[in-house]
Amino acid sequence: MRLENSFVPVEGVGERTERALWRAGVTHWDAFDGAWADVPGVGPTLADRIRDFIEEGERRLAAGDARFFEAALPARERWRLVEDFRDRTAYLDIETTGLDRRWHDVTVVGVHRAGETTTLVRGRDLTAETLEAALGDAALLVTFNGAQFDVPFLEAAFDTTLDLAHVDLRYPCGRLGLTGGLKAIEAAVGIERDRPDLDGFEAVRLWHAYERGDDAALETLLAYNREDVVHLEGLMELVAGRLHETVFEAALG
């Protein structure tokens, strides 16, 4: 599903009105004029707001401004950004020494984009500058629970702002009834791991083992992080596809 199919970013358009537009054949911005008059809930005032949004949306989309759409979309609908910004999406996952960003450190940051994975390690090459370089010209960030954990942790650790539109996969997964942690959701949808026994607590132990001189522990930790961040892309594609079916295609009958 593309942003051009979306009308819920417009003030006054909820999911019911959007579905009514789709069922009336207004499945794309280009189809709005000439078809809206018979749609329940759409009067002249709302029609003007929709036209204004379409005009602005076309400009913002051409400019690659994902933040405009992130701000306009309800949080539960931000998965719709993925199709239009697929080529400029960065998948991110971090490892830390604990859960409290006031006292604990970021140890590993993984960024996967355009088929390549960059892994940055504390004490080696993990800095605000290398993180910025890894994200490059990305317009959209995808994480799992990153709104509560990864993003604020990184921003506090490096005194920076990750100025990207953000899809936290935890929320679109929840819309599909996929709950629990990332590993549990992966298992539920058939994504297999090389080391299913590893988890966040083990990641802390591996880092401390590395600090005591165990280089093999670091390699295991890095492999774990790479698997996390690469699997985010597969899970995002799967979730976006399922939501396209249940939100858009189902509305068309």
Image (tube, rainbow, N blue to C red):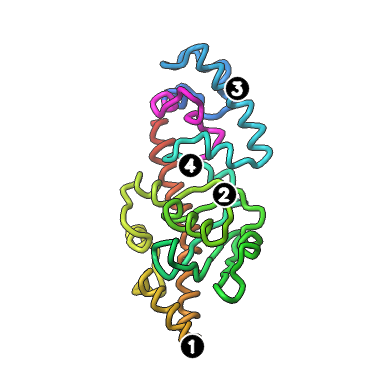
Taking depth in this image into account, of 151 and 40 the one nearest to the observer is 151
- Of callouts 1 and 3, which one flags the residue occurring earlier in the amino acid sequence? 3
**x and y percent of residue 204 in the render?**
40, 74
Label 3 secondary element: helix
Asked whether the residues under the numbered discs 1 and 3 touch, taking CB atoms below 8 Å apart as contact, a structural biologist would say: no
Q: Nearer the viewer, mark 1 or mark 4?
A: 1
From the viewer's side, name the closer residue of 144 and 191.
Answer: 144
Q: Using the numbered discs, state the Cα–Cα distance from disc 2 to disc 4 in whole angstroms.
A: 10 Å
Q: Of callouts 1 and 2, which one flags the residue occurring earlier in the amino acid sequence? A: 2
- The residue that mark 3 highlights is 52
Tell me which label, 2 or 3, sits earlier in the chain: 3
**SS at mark 2?**
strand
Of 155 and 92, which appears nearest the observer? 155
Q: Three-letter amino acid code at disc 1? A: Gly
- Crowd class of label 4 (few under 14; some 14 to 19; many from 20; radius 10 Å): many
Which numbered disc, 1 or 2, marks the residue closer to the eye?
A: 1
Query: In the rendered structure, which amino acid carries the disc numbered 2?
Result: Leu
Q: Is residue 61 left or right of residue 39?
A: right
Magenta range is 1-19
Is label 3 in contact with label 4 (beta carbons under 8 Å)?
A: no
Disc 3 crowd rating (10 Å Cα; few below 14, some 14-19, many 20+) is few
Q: What's the mark number on residue 78?
A: 4
Q: Is residue 2 magenta?
A: yes
Report how far apart the C-alphas of labels 3 and 4 lie in the structure: 20 Å
- At a point 47% along the width and 30% down the height, the residue shown is 8
Proximity of marks 1 and 4: CB atoms separated by less than 8 Å:
no
Label 1, label 4: how far apart the Cα atoms are: 43 Å
Give the residue pinned by disc 2.
140
Distance between the alpha carbons at the discs numbered 2 and 3:
24 Å
Element marked by disc 1: loop
Q: How far across and down, in percent of the image, does residue 47 sit?
A: 53, 17
